[in-house]
Amino acid sequence: QQQVKQSPQSLIVQKGGISIINCAYENTAFDYFPWYQQFPGKGPALLIAIRPDVSEKKEGRFTISFNKSAKQFSLHIMDSQPGDSATYFCAASINSNYQLIWGAGTKLIIKP
Amino acid sequence: NAGVTQTPKFQVLKTGQSMTLQCAQDMNHNSMYWYRQDPGMGLRLIYYSASEGTTDKGEVPNGYNVSRLNKREFSLRLESAAPSQTSVYFCASSDGGRVDQPQHFGDGTRLSIL
């Protein structure tokens, strides 16, 4: 019930295309859903986050879509660029808690 | 503008050896974290410290000890290293203990245990 399942494990997208990464969760008490971006040799960095009271949040080319009834959320990267090539992690938590439950990660490669 | 600094960056140990991983942050953050990252498993929390002098176990604390030396420094110790502890270890800090405050990560320590 604590797991966050992330798919796909890896993804190749052409430059200018849309990259979509999906996550699913079981614990209905989760109320905070961040996405972190990690470049090789670096630690993860917060990219964008959403709470379940909204269905979508957009920041530049990055959008989180949230489906509370399906217990799923996804990251969309519009106009994907080679600089977006990285590993992306979804996570979930109860907001009052300090512990994030992380997905397994998606390695995204954007082909020029 | 260092952020979170981890030392060493790489280390190879033999089974049974001990080692301390060091972490320091210069952002005046209260909360600090130790994670391990294994292929296909995402990040798993080892220990958490809300403030100087306090620590809490995370998801995978067995085989590890921590010390919050002061507000800046949070160390992770392996008393008797095992091959299962081969991993990339990340230290992170945040302004408070709530997950909606971004965690700032170091660049990791890559640890191999033979």
Image: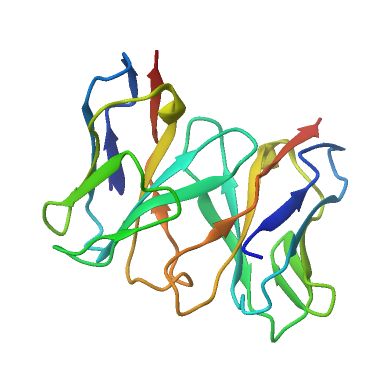
A27 lies left or right of A22: left
Colour mode of the rendering: rainbow
Task: Check the image and report above or below for B19 versus A24.
Answer: above
Q: Residue at x 25, y 58 (%)?
A: B27
Q: Residue furthest bottom?
A: A53
Task: Check the image and report above or below for A96 versus B34.
Answer: below
User: Where, by quadrant of the figure, is residue A40 drawn?
Assistant: top right
Residue B88: horizontal and vertical position, in percent?
44, 32
Q: Residue at x 73, y 67 (%)?
A: A64
Q: Residue at x 22, y 27 (%)?
A: B19
Q: Residue at x 47, y 36 (%)?
A: A42
| Quarter that holds the C terminus of chain B | top left
Residue A84: horizontal and vertical position, in percent?
68, 42
Residue B62: horizontal and vertical position, in percent?
36, 44
A16 lies left or right of B66: right
- For the residue pair A40 and A102, the one nearer the viewer reads as A102
The mark total stands at: 0
- For the residue pair B98 and A39, the one nearer the viewer reads as B98
Residue A37: horizontal and vertical position, in percent?
59, 48
